[in-house]
Image (cartoon, helix red, strand yellow):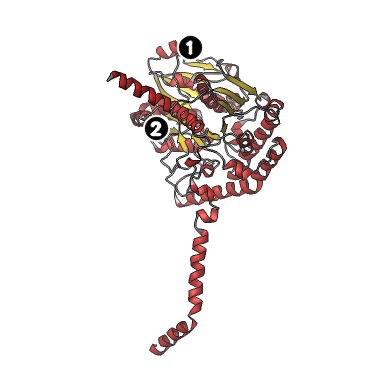
Amino acid sequence: MSRLRFILFLLVLSTGYVNSANLLGVFSSPGYSQFILGEKLMTELARRGHKVTVISPYKPREEVENYRTILTDGLIQGPQRDMFQRVSESYWSRIKGIHHLGYTLTEYTLGHPDVQELIHSNKSFDLVIAEQFANEALMGFGPHFKAPTILFSSIGLSEWNSHLMGNIKLPSVVPTSKTEYTESMTFFQRSVNALVNLGDILYKEFVAFPIHQEYLETYFPTKMDLKEVIYNASLMFLNSHFSIGQPTFLTTSVVEIGGFHISPKKLPEHIQKFLDDARDGAILFSMGTNLNLSNLSRDKLSSICKALSKLKQRVLWKMEEDAVSEKYENILMSKWLPQVDILGHSNVVAFVTHGGLLSTTEAVFHGVPMVGIPIFGDQRMNVARCLQKGIAVHLSFEDLTETSLFDAINQVIENPTYRQNVKKLSAIFHDRVVEPLDLAMYWVEYVIRHGWASHLKDPSLNLTWYQLYLVDVIGFAVLCALIVYQCFPNRRRQSGKEKYKRN
């Protein structure tokens, strides 16, 4: 009996076995958070025996066998824009700004000498994994190398990627990430959401797509049509989970793996001691990797310092040490902090954050309530969702003062409802059939095993927009009704005369 079980065990293993594959990862975003996600995914594949080549502006944080980087670091070494200027930008500016960023990243990446050398080489790949974010021409690597493509979205399902896999994103219930709305929208909000979605669709169709078509023609020797390229993906990973976002319709070829990057590690000794000795609790203050607090005005920075120094809790503040001349007894400043591991410490009672998806995900993972101060991008929507779920307090950047920050932090700490809500949400987040990283590995190897996995593709991708929304059917029905109506003119006149006689 035991021998039979052993044979069955070997059979199960053999059905899921994949030989070492040659994989290309395209993660060109200069955002360090996006790099963390791409690195985690690709290093795990390398550890599992696959040969990995990654196009990235960052080197891996640790050496991993079978992992090679094509470094495109010129953009992150250049002057960085002050992101705090984007707080009050209009919806139209948000649409244009994201696409213009996409143009810059795409053209720089494709035009990089080392990337061009790869494109014109005789190398082959079994699979391409590409980050998707206003960079349509970068999806050309898959068709160029005649390899299936898996897309990766660092911000979850959005207006930039939902259509690529056949997901119908209704503006009545799914807010665009350019707004601060949740799925519970008023009539006015639904109207704004629909208009912003329409503006984005029109901009992509008539401005962005022609530019990316030019990039394909300029940087790839292979002749490709952009529309065929962007709808070519076999699968798409979303860095999201319905517990943090919202329940929504996903096609078979879309897989949520939110939280896959989280693997708790031991804290540095000085941070461990700082938190262990925090008898009244500790607070983490971090505005992410793209926001440099040293760009703040002196008044704003002074207000933050005064508010944090008044707290009885200890504060870990991700901040350039030389930006603040004063030293505070309860505040430990550092240019870099191991955020996810700090949030896992039992003495951490609150998290002041910009509301990036990685930050909100890590807070929910560890069950820590938040004070959200969104600045740009999807941060507004992320904080709005956390507010709706009762796990955060929202504080607008314009209203940030010493008093408002101090009160918001104390509200989150002293009202037990926030901690109770986030603990419940954390339990839902952790309640999964399989760990998200293992799920990602399964689907990568699934696509490798089954070629292009075209059986996963949604049939709606074969339809035009007017076929998908039955515009042609409705038009035909209206036309038939008009024809029938016109075919019986005498009947209409007779009916009219009868009514006249009765009157």
Q: Does residue 20 lie above or below 329 as drawn?
A: below
Asked if residue 405 can be seen in this view, the reply is no
Q: Amino acid at mark 2?
A: Ile
Q: Position of residue 210 (x, y in %)?
A: 67, 45
Dot 2 alpha-carbon crowd within 10 angstroms: few under 14, some 14 to 19, many 20 or more:
many
Q: Secondary structure at mark 2?
A: loop
Residue shown at 68% from the left, 41% from the top:
223
Identify the amino acid type marked 1. Pro
Would you call the spot at circle 1 few (<14 residues within 10 Å), some (14-19), or many (20 or more)? few
Question: Which is more toward the observer, 361 or 278?
Answer: 361
Quadrant (top left/top right/bottom left/bottom right) for the C terminus: bottom left
Residue 391, numbered label: 2
Residue 403 pos. (x, y %)? 47, 29
Q: Secondary structure at mark 1?
A: loop
Q: Position of residue 87 (x, y in %)?
A: 57, 36
Front residue of 89/396: it is 89
| Image mark for residue 268 | 1
- 1 above or below 358? above
Q: Residue furthest bottom?
A: 501
Residue 307 at x, y percent in the picture: 48, 24
- At x 52% / y 56%, what residue is drawn? 467
Q: Furthest-left residue in view?
A: 1
Q: Is residue 199 above or below residue 269?
A: below
